[in-house]
Image: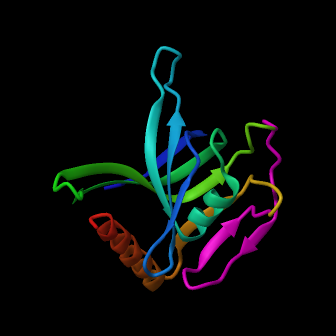
Amino acid sequence: MLNRVFLVGRLSQDPRPSTSTQGLSICNFSIAVDGPTRNMPTSFINCVAFAKSADFINQYIKKGDPLVVEGALQSRSYVNKSGQTVYVTEVVANNVQGLGSRKNDQYNPVNDNVKQNNNFDYNIGSYSNTNPNTTYNNSSSNQSSNDDLSDEQSMWMDSLDE
């Protein structure tokens, strides 16, 4: 079975940053994806990013900016403060790439490849402090790091119940 999602669209509102109880960066955002024809409505897809991808979105991507999101579709539920069960379907973003901004509407590819080696061992490609045309990839070559990230994600989801 394969659970893989690719989205190309624009950020529909400014990102909503937060931090887990363990200090992991989290970013909730929504991407507006146009239908295949003019007669098809725009879809607004809820997404969540963690760690370096979340930091990138929070710092460089603003409402209206075009971006590419690669990830996996996730469905979950929780009970809110009113006692109602809330069902959520969202994309957990593993790879996020900014495509420029609405202001300059031009794409300047960045060819710098930077390898970041931290607790999560992320590969960071096309990183530039001055240009939001950046890719962050949450895929990890270290399985134990992936396990830690999954624990962080589940802790984040559990915190929504509170």
Q: Residue at x 65, y 62 (%)?
A: 56
Q: Is residue 110 left or right of residue 61?
A: right
Q: Which residues are magenta?
A: 104-128
Residue at 39 percent across and 70 percent down: it is 153
Query: Measured from the top left, where is residue 130 in percent x and y?
Result: 83, 59
Please provide percent x and percent y for residue 156: 38, 70
- Image quarter where the C terminus lies is bottom left
Determine whether 121 is above or below 6 in the image: below
Q: How many marks?
A: 0
Where residue 75 sits: x, y (%)?
29, 53
- Is 70 positioned to the left or the right of 136 in the image? left
Asked which colour scheme the image uses, the reply is rainbow
- Residue closest to the eye, 51 or 159: 159
Q: Is residue 85 magenta?
A: no
Residue at the image point whose x is 71% and y is 57% from the top = 134
The x, y position of residue 24, in whole percent, is 50, 75
Q: Farthest residue toward the front?
A: 82
**Is 119 within the magenta?**
yes
Q: Give the prevailing secondary structure in the magenta stretch.
A: loop
Q: Is residue 2 left or right of residue 101?
A: left
Quadrant occupied by the N terminus: bottom left
**Residue at position x 78%, y 37% in the image:** 103
User: For the view shown, which residue lies furthest in the top direction?
Assistant: 39
